[in-house]
Amino acid sequence: MSLLCLYLLKTNNETDKIYTGIFAFYMYKNTITFKLKIDIGEFMNEVLKKIQEIGIVPVVVLDDAKNALPLGKALMEGGLPCAEVTFRTAAAEESIRIMAENFPDMLVGAGTVLTTDQVDRAVAAGAKFIVSPGLNPKIVKYCVEKGIVITPGCANPSDVEQAIEHGLEVVKFFPAEQAGGLNYIKAIAAPYVGVNFMPTGGINPKNVRDYLAYNRIVACGGSWMVKGDLINAGEWDKIKELTAEAAQIVKESRGK
């Protein structure tokens, strides 16, 4: 680049100046774009790496944002510093904001995201990743272009191939048990060697070990430690206990 600039200063050929200037601008623009893509990619990889380290992502439905603070505390103290707060209720956005602000070391994401407006609201509230029940190309493209981590729901080879087309390497497998479970994931994973999975739906303490033992599973989404009745009853100690048990399962399953 510096040599091109030096040539522009010394040459007297106007045509050369024009074409060399265009080429130099093109190279400069694409260098910035390339660096930006690398930076975005590194951020996305860091988020997914952290999800993999945590192993189990609590899938949360909050009817009242006032429960976000004690729930976040219970999850943190229980050993799963992560929450996928689903946009199934009006309290989701504020709940994400409360968790993200009060627990900076917690990986807070948004689930059941169905529109780009929800993506914007979730990210503005502090969400570090987006999860959707299905693969909506519009939402996936929107997130990828903005450098937002997204794991869309995939339940068949066609879904996985759409995810690959958008440059994704991790997808949600949903609904996991109902769609065929671990055996189906192993079958669908075989031809797609560059894709890993985050199964959600029907995951529980009895089957989660088997999922986590498979090397193509990044993490599992589960709600047994954050059931609605426990949250609404304010059973924070029980949630902390169940969370600690889930965290221990991750350690045992992955030899930590």
Image: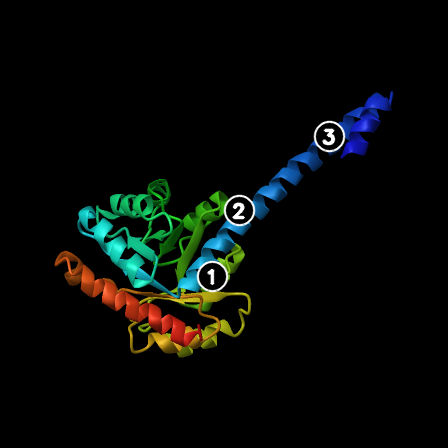
Horizontal side, residue 229 vs residue 71: left or right: left
Q: Position of residue 7 (x, y in %)?
A: 84, 28
Which of the pair 126/14 is nearer the observer? 126
Q: Amino acid at mark 3?
A: Ile
Horizontal side, residue 76 vs residue 215: left or right: left
Give the quadrant of residue 200.
bottom left
Q: CA distance from mark 1 to mark 3?
A: 39 Å
* Within-10-Å neighbours for mark 2: few <14, some 14–19, many 20+: some
Sequence-earlier tag: 2 or 1: 2
Q: In the rendered image, which residue does mark 3 sit on?
A: 22
Q: Amino acid at mark 1?
A: Val
Q: In the rendered image, which residue does mark 1 sit on?
A: 170
Residue at left 65%, top 35%? 29
| SS type, badge 3 | helix
Q: Position of residue 80 (x, y in %)?
A: 34, 61
Sequence-earlier tag: 3 or 2: 3
Give the quadrant of residue 242.
bottom left
Horizontal side, residue 213 vs residue 41: left or right: left
Is residue 192 in view?
A: yes
Q: Amino acid at mark 2?
A: Ile
- Which of labels 2 and 1 is toward the front? 2
Q: Position of residue 53 (x, y in %)?
A: 44, 63
Q: CA distance from mark 3 to mark 2?
A: 27 Å
